Amino acid sequence: MFTASYPITLSAGQKINVRLVTRVLNGADQLQTYKFEIVIRAEQDIPDPDPDPNPDPDPDPDPDPDPDPDPDPDPDPDPDPDPDPDLDPNPDPDTEEEELFVPEEEDVATPIEKLELPEDEDVAAPANRGGGRELPDTGGCVKISVGISH
Amino acid sequence: MRKEKIVFVFIVLLFLIVSSVYAVSAKNLINWADTPSSSDTSLSQSPDSVDIGNPNTAMNAGSTDVVLKPENGNIEVVILNGYTGYQSYIEASIVNITNMAVRITDAEIVAGSVAPVNSFDFIEIAFVD
C-alpha cells in the first residue's frame, strides 16, 4: 500500500509501505553526486479528550421551510421627496400677480338715503280715543274696575 | 503568599516533566522497517524517466542508491550523475513502535554527508501515491 494522504496515521505497532520521489531541482550543476539522509517526522495522535458522546444529529429539526424572502415586496418605490415643489419659500411681494376682484358698476348697490327723522314738536300728540275717560294718576299703578251690567 | 509560591513551583515542575516525557517519546515513535529500494539503482542500468509535468528531459545518466544506516536508523540516499529534473522513486516501510497512534507529518532531508554540493538546496523529496 502506498499513500501520500496527510496526515498518515498509524495505530500501535502498525507498519505501512510508503513511496517517496526524489527530484533534482533547477539550478543544480549537471552530473553531480548528491548524498543525504531522509527522516520521517511524526507526532502522537492525541485523541479529542472530550468528544461529545451524544452529538445532536439535527440541531434544528424544524427550520422555517418557507422563510419569507421579501417581507416588504412593495415598498413605496417613489416616495415624493417634495410634496409641493412649486411652493416659493420666499415669495416676492412686488411680483404678486393675484388679481383683485373689482365689482361692476351696476352691481354696486345704491346706498340707502339717510332718512330724515321728524323733530319732537313735529310729532302730533296722540289723539284721545273717544269713549273713555281719563284715568287718574295712580302714581305708576293702574287700577282697573270691572263692572257687570245686566 | 507562601502557599501560592509553592503551587506555582509545583505547576512549573509538572509542566517540565510532562514536556520532557513527550519530547523523548516523540523521538522514538516510528522506525524505517525492512530494506528500502530504489527505482533506478546504479546496477540496474534502467533508463531515466521524468513524470508528466516535469519540464526537463531525461538524460539516462543518473542513478539512485539507498541504504538503511544501522547507526541512526535513517535512510541514506546517494544520487550519482544527477542533473536538473532527474528523479527517482524510493520505496520503504514505516512501523509505529509505540503502543499509541502516531501521525506522520512530513519527510525531510537531514544533514548526512553533503558531497559535493549542498543537497538541501537542490533535492526535493515528497510522499507520493
Image (cartoon, rainbow, N blue to C red):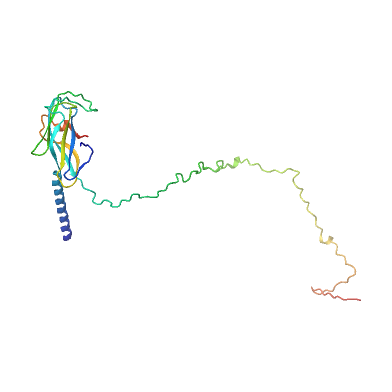
**Percent position of residue A94, x then y:** 60, 41
Q: Specify the quadrant of the image occupied by residue A13.
A: top left
Q: Residue furthest front?
A: A1
**For the point 18% across and 37% down, which residue is it?**
A17
Q: Specify the quadrant of the image occupied by residue B113.
A: top left
**For the point 18% across and 34% down, which residue is it?**
A20
Q: Residue furthest right?
A: A150
Q: Is A111 placed left or right of B118 in the picture? A: right
Q: Residue furthest left?
A: B71
**For the point 15% across and 58% down, which residue is it?**
B6
**Percent position of residue A78, x then y:** 51, 41
**For the point 83% across and 61% down, which residue is it?**
A121
Relative vertical location of residue A9 with respect to residue A120 in this rendering, above or below? above
**Percent position of residue A2, x then y:** 20, 36
Q: Specify the quadrant of the image occupied by residue B26.
A: top left
Of residues A143 and A137, which is closer to you in this image? A143
Of residues A142 and B33, which is closer to you in this image? B33
Number of marks in the rendered image: 0
